[in-house]
Image: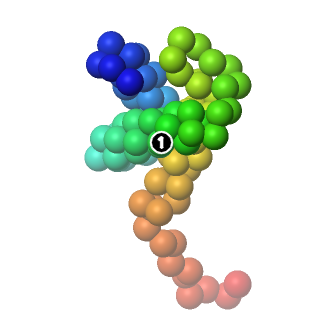
Amino acid sequence: MIVVTIIPGILIATLVGMGFYFFFNDRFSRIFTYIFSANFFFFLGQTISQQIGWTFMRIGSYNLFPALLSSIIGLFLTRFFSSPAQKQSKGNH
């Protein structure tokens, strides 16, 4: 991919990461983690889909569906692994 085709991918992935942040109304410190994670998994999904030849919802040079799917899965994984473990209270449960 050349720079001209990378920039729209970065913008799309950044919007996905910001949307995920606003949807879950998380701490502000996590917005950069979500944006980085969305970009990483977006291009990972794009690369994997090119390698296996999956071209569903191809727009320009992007395989948009696999890239967005991997970005969303990656964001949920990031949210799961970056959330602190919830402690059980010592009550009469």
In which quadrant of the rendered view does residue 12 lie? top left
Residue drawn at (40%, 42%), measured in percent from left and top?
40
Q: Position of residue 77 (x, y in %)?
A: 53, 55
Q: Amino acid at mark 1?
A: Leu
Tell me if residue 34 can be seen.
no
Labels in figure, total: 1
Quarter of the image containing the C terminus?
A: bottom right
Q: In the picture shown, does residue 43 fall above or below 27? A: above
Q: Which residue is mark 1?
A: 44
Residue drawn at (39%, 16%), measured in percent from left and top?
5
Residue drawn at (45%, 36%), measured in percent from left and top?
43
Residue drawn at (52%, 59%), measured in percent from left and top?
80
Q: In the picture shown, does residue 88 fall above or below 73? A: below
Helix, strand or loop at label 1? It is: helix
Q: How is the image coloured?
A: rainbow
Tell me if residue 37 can be seen.
yes
Quarter of the image containing the N terminus?
A: top left
Q: Few, some or many C-alpha atoms within 10 Å of disc 1 (few <14, some 14-19, many ≥20)?
A: some
Q: Position of residue 36 (x, y in %)?
A: 34, 41
The residue closer to the viewer here, 17 or 89, is 17
The residue closer to the viewer here, 72 or 48, is 48
Please give left or right for residue 32 compared with residue 48 in the image: left
Q: Position of residue 88 (x, y in %)?
A: 56, 80
The residue closer to the viewer here, 62 or 84, is 62
In which quadrant of the rendered view does residue 6 lie? top left
Q: Position of residue 49 (x, y in %)?
A: 60, 36
